[in-house]
Amino acid sequence: MTRSTLTLLFLCLSFVALPQDLLAQDLSPTRKLRRVYLALTQTEPTVERYEALLVAPDPDLFIQQEVDALTQTPEYRTNLTDWAHEYIPFPLVNTSRVWHSAKSITASRCGEDTLHAGKIGFLAGSNSDDPAVCNDPDAAVSSATPWWDPQTTVEAVGSAANQDVFFDGQDCGVVNTSNYWVMPKKKGCGCGPHMTYCKRGDLGHPFEGSYPKGYGDGEIYHPISQRRAVMEEPANLFAHIILENKPFSDLILSNYTVANRGLYHMYVRQGRMSGVHTDGDEDRWFDMFNNDEEWIEVLFSQMNPHLLDNPDYRFDPRYDAEMLGLPAAGVLTMIGPNFAWPRPRVRAARWLESLACDEFSPPELPVEFPAYQRDPATEGTCLHCHTRLDPAAMSFKRFIQQGGAIAGVGNWRLEKLVSYNSDRQRFMNSLLPNTVLTPLTEEEIEADLNNRLIDFMQPDQQLFGQTSDGTVGPRGFAKILIASGKFDQCAVRRAYERFGGKKLDLGKDAAELDEAVNEFVSNGRNMNELIKKLVLSRSEGW
């Protein structure tokens, strides 16, 4: 009988079912190792790792070292992103709606039998050049290093050869603030520096089909599609924070995220739509990426200056002249979740459930409520939930245009939206004065359309017993979650359940939970260290 056969036989015997009262005390080293692997990587140890364990002088030290090694593996990262999708579950993003921040001019290549064979031109659509431009010897021609592939050079012809991004002060990508169109022939606009706008169309390499490689509305699960990127951004930041041993609170407080080239471009477009990006020749942001698959840590403000680095930014539309933007706040200011949850109250409810482990359930009967008039946070049967839902929802008013624009900022000030714009109409009809969601008087509402967008709790308002320090938007909400302890408590409970195999009860496990939360906070909210501790404790059979 070979050594490997003997090892396997030993392993099989070690997995024989034990009485429940012995499991906690008499787990074999091999069983402990198996628990560690399953918890961290969702895989089982190899025979070689079992054999190494059996000859190790100190099995417990060996298992501790395995834990450290496993937290450096791709499998562990995959496990973290899987957990993140459970932690922050938002539905599929429909790129045909959200792509106002990413879609660009329809372009295609001139045919092989034309004078300008292979050159990029605007050859389709009512506002494009006539296809005859491909045979026009006088048509403008230019070369550029495109943003999507800095290692190549492309040539354009006709209007597409125009390298400007502004025409008479108008952003080439914005004809009006209600819709996104590019009209090169009418407006005199072209691809812009680095072919910023030349993006859709049958352009051949590095594009595939009628959409650019990895940047169109194509396969949901294409590894570098923008649809995939916007869905994966929260999970990738989640995993990045844990793997880099950053404070877990950065999930909702950070001014940084992780992005690939396609996702970065979405945020660039989001900023340009607001009027803050010019993409001059010196702006070669795409050079940061080695390839389309690479994800790197970047500041939100690098991509869209309206997502501010200032963590304490305050703005009151009643008294302040012009809003600079919203303080960046990790997952709370990402395009994907704000598109997937399209209304302030829905966003607030989902974030409270995910980040504070809040539960929205009906009260125990019998209970009486004041008659509903106009404010669900103070009247009617809905107030049971809306008393905490609406103070949170205030922070998420400003995301419009399917999550890709910030209302009241730059080109998105409400008076710049046409009267029939759906977002403007919603603000007019749903943000009513003298309500918890809109704590303004009738006079303040009438004074300025943008006053309705007030997005920080007033001094007489509270959420989880906390008052606002005046920080606007999602960042103000994040501060309240941290100050109340709800974020930390929820994070520890979720970690115990995922990696410790133990669901802590708020009642009977209160003392253990409080101790775990205090240790988590004092340890800099290092989720990686908490996971290691839980996995090792679980391997002891607690």
Image (cartoon, rainbow, N blue to C red):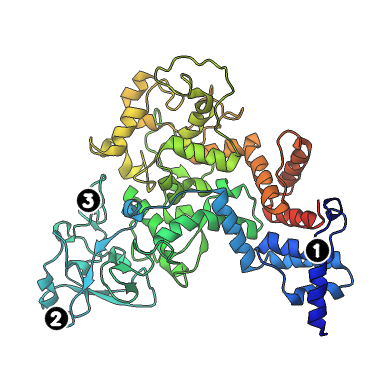
Camera-nearest residue between 345 and 310: 345
457 and 49: which one is in front? 49
Q: Mark 3 and mark 2 in contact? Answer it, CB < 8 Å.
A: no
Is residue 395 visible in this depiction of the protein? yes
Q: Is mark 2 on a helix, strand or loop?
A: loop
Q: Position of residue 190 (x, y in %)?
A: 22, 63
- Distance from the alpha carbon under mark 3 to that under mark 2: 32 Å
Q: Which mark is residue 40?
A: none
Identify whether 457 is placed above or below 21. above
Which quadrant holds residue 517?
top right
- Please give the residue where the numbered disc 2 appears in the rendered image: 114
* Marking on residue 175: 3
Percent coordinates x, y for residue 391 in the rendering: 50, 29
CB contact under 8 Å: marks 1 and 2: no
Q: Seen in the image, is 451 located left or right of residue 527?
A: left
Amino acid marked by disc 2 = Thr
Q: Mark 1 points at which residue?
A: 16
Disc 1 is placed on an element classified as loop
Q: Residue at x 44, y 27 (%)?
A: 437
Q: Residue 221 at what x, y percent from top left?
A: 44, 63
Q: Where's the N terminus, which quadrant?
A: bottom right
Identify the amino acid type marked 3: Val
Neighbours of disc 3 within 10 Å: few (<14), some (14-19), many (20+): some
N-terminal of the two: label 3 or label 1?
Answer: 1
Disc 1 residue type (three-letter): Val
**Could one spot residue 313 in this view of the protein?**
no
